[in-house]
Amino acid sequence: MNSGLPECRAVYEEQFDAMLSARIKGSVSKRKDSSIHVEIWNFSPSKLQVFWQDGSDEGIDVGEIAINSVYETETYRTHTFAFFDEDGRRIGKLTMYPECKLYIIHPMDPKAESSAKYHEVLNGRHEHCPGHTDEATKWKYELWDD
């Protein structure tokens, strides 16, 4: 598993040194992406554990969302979060986009779809996630899994 590690380290240290030198000379600008504040609503039948996908197998545990509750966070464009139910099963992922500030994990039971809170949040999505009404692009604002 560690084969090639010294060679990789040498390459990356050289690249890192070049980046630092460029920053000192002023040729590397600061990150242009600004953070976005998002709400992720959980209407699934289970409390969910939230993991930010940092590239590792597990991700970073960043909290939980109770049933019929919201998880709010400051994040960046294309950050992805994975959601696990109380049995540890991954129910899906959401990727963040700056044009969408509100994401919904929908109920799995049709009876839950009639709740007043669900409809209130669903109606708010038109204002806070306008791209969701476009049939060609709304998929990117929904729960997905690989």
Image (spheres, rainbow, N blue to C red):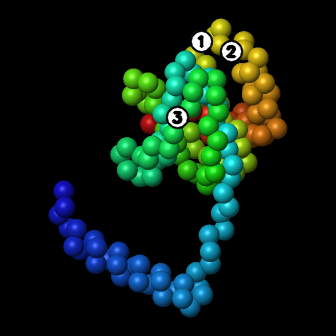
Q: Residue at x 68, y 15 (%)?
A: 113
* Residue that carries the numbered disc 2 in the rendered image: 113
* Mark nearer the viewer, 3 or 2: 3
Q: Which x, y percent locates residue 118?
A: 72, 21
Identity, as a three-letter code, of the amino acid under mark 2: Glu
Mark drawn on residue 109: 1
Q: Residue at x 72, y 14 (%)?
A: 115
Marks 2,1: beta carbons within 8 A: yes
Distance CA(mark 1)–CA(mark 3): 21 Å
Q: Which x, y percent locates residue 27?
A: 59, 85
Identity, as a three-letter code, of the amino acid under mark 1: Asp
Identity, as a three-letter code, of the amino acid under mark 3: Glu
Identify the secondary structure beneath mark 3: strand
Between disc 3 and disc 2, whose residue precedes?
3
Label 3: few (<14), some (14–19) or many (≥20) C-alpha neighbours in 10 Å? some
* Residue that carries the numbered disc 3 in the rendered image: 64
Task: Report if residue 139 is visible in the image.
Answer: no
Q: Which x, y percent locates residue 108?
A: 57, 16
